[in-house]
Amino acid sequence: MTHSTRPQDLRGIPAEAVCAQLLPWLPRQRWFAGKGRTIRGVEVVSAVELVRGDPGMFHLVLGVALEGSRGLPAVVDHYQLLLGVRRWRVDRLDHATIGRVGGDPAAGAVLYDAAHDSELTTWLLERFAAADAGDPCEVGPLVFQRCAERAPRGRLAGLVVGAEQSNTSIVFGDDVILKLFRRLTPGVNPDLELCLALAGAGSRRIPQPVAWFEADFEGEATTLGLLQEYLRTGTDGWELAKTSVRDLYADQDLLGIGGGTEPLHAHEVGGDFAGESFRLGVATAEVHADLARTLPTAIAGEDELQSLAEQMSRRLDAAAGRVPELEPYTDRLRDAYRDLAQLRREDHPVPLQRVHGDFHLGQVMRTSTRWVLIDFEGEPAQPLVERRALHSPLRDVAAMLRSFDYAARHLLAERRTGQSGAPAPHLVRRAEEWALRNRDAFCAGYAKAGAVDPRAEPVLLRAFETDKAVYEVVYESGNRPTWLPVPMSAIRRLAERSPQSSPAG
Ligand SMILES: Nc1ncnc2c1ncn2[C@@H]1O[C@H](COP(=O)(O)OP(=O)(O)O)[C@@H](O)[C@H]1O
Ligand SMILES: O=P(O)(O)O[C@H]1O[C@H](CO)[C@@H](O[C@H]2O[C@H](CO)[C@@H](O)[C@H](O)[C@H]2O)[C@H](O)[C@H]1O
């Protein structure tokens, strides 16, 4: 095993040749956060040879320099890559191929994303298994640490999960799942930090943490991967909610094949989701209570609310600079932030604590027995200091309310693709009804578990929902432009609504 910082070559392959192959490959990866921006250059910041031979594997930290554009400054982002190197092409790894280096096939090599090569990822699992609680396994600068309770089984084949992800997750057998964090920010990843805190609090609302690995990056111990219990009976909440919405639309003649009967309402169709939404509200309140019990809390001062409102307003400006569709609504959206800034601590204390930070239906899994929350990393685009800051738990609530809206409306956006015109008004009404019913059930469950009733907090909810919808507009315009109408419909609703109207709607 060799380790080099700013390496000249990777066992005979020049680092520049690797970077040249990475340049067109990176922007095609789901986890690449700089989509739509011009890459000025890619460099290998550090390289550790993990497996020598054919296949070989290197752990790389890449520096990706992005040009400034549309209000965003020029930056260098860092990404983690397990680079696989093989002499010959292997069919099963074609989808993970980065490129070929060296002109002559006999002398050259195929470069690929080794996360997809079970022959190589077993190596990682073995390092976790080799670590003991309190006695890490060190491989050059990489440190593999294990939690006390559980040892992973070594030598299981790893399979990358097919989900649309910000990172890359590998399931080993049906035992554990390893998340490789892609974009690196110096420091402890909140996903690890909050999972350890919740496990320590005895929470059964998270997959139990098993191990993690880290390395020094820019002078700080930085989380590179998190190994957790695999929820083998789990289905993610987004898939479950979609099933319910599909049932709803099946009866609304979405596909134009219905028989002209009176359309059914959300509570009358086969897959009513409100019971699950209620239970999800309970689970969310329990996790918030455990986080508040084990980690720092505070009451927001008026200056903090003021500065939060200013931050939200700045995010809105930046978003409008990037997505012109937002521009007509910015003034009215800002009303929500003004109301937030005017809350007075003596008549309206706002409790702050650690929160999930990027909560949506894809971040919760329904197992055979309960709802479990995953992925406490926070919004990947936010700086780490912001993701680790104390926030109102209603920020998570508002984000989940947005997700019910997404579940209800995304089929309408997809149907619009390639066709002209807006979806039929009766379908929009049914979508609104489904969202309202499930948003309300979620809030009821949240309150039932002893937390504040979110419906009694219209000012906070509206500000958080607006901020999230603004984030989503930017996210969709960069990642899934055909879905842009989903957050844009919320932007229109939030721009029109007075804070007194029902927050669940
Ligand atoms: N503990 C787990 N058990 C089973 N599946 C999981 C588990 N954790 C994550 N997954 C699956 O992997 C997907 C991505 O996980 P997530 O933590 O949200 O990754 P990312 O941070 O890349 O978005 C989830 O939507 C889910 O399908
Ligand atoms: O990849 P992450 O889970 O960290 O989150 C990012 O991607 C999400 C989409 O996969 C995005 O969520 C948005 O779309 C969801 C439906 O696909 C919807 O349920 C969410 O409410 C909506 O915000 C998330 O914002 C983004 O950070």
Image (cartoon, grey):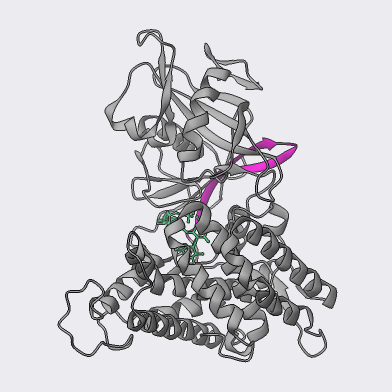
- From this view, report whether residue 486 is shown above or below residue 28: below
Q: Residue furthest right?
A: 303
Q: Judge from the rendering whether residue 111 lies leftward or rightward of residue 182; answer left or right.
A: left
Task: Choose between 244 and 195: the one closer to the eye.
Answer: 244
Q: Quadrant of residue 482?
A: bottom left
- Residue 323 belongs to magenta span: no
Q: Quadrant of residue 467?
A: bottom right
Q: Is residue 199 visible?
A: no
Residue 225 in the image: x percent, y percent? 54, 44
Ligand 1: quadrant of the figure: bottom left
**Magenta stretch bounds:** 207-225
Residue drawn at x 70%, y 62% as measured from the top left: 317
Task: Choose between 143 and 348: the one closer to the eye.
Answer: 348
Q: Quadrant of residue 253?
A: bottom left
Residue drawn at x 72%, y 78% as measured from the top left: 351
- From this view, report whether residue 74 is shown above or below residue 382: above
Residue drawn at x 52%, y 74% as measured from the top left: 490
Task: Choose between 273 and 370: the one closer to the eye.
Answer: 273
- Residue 217 belongs to magenta span: yes
Q: Which quadrant does the N terminus fall into?
A: top right
Q: Judge from the rendering whether residue 115 lies leftward or rightward of residue 420; answer left or right.
A: right
Residue 363 in the image: x percent, y percent? 48, 63
Residue 495 in the image: x percent, y percent? 60, 78
Q: Residue furthest left?
A: 259
- From this view, report whether residue 19 is shown above or below residue 354: above
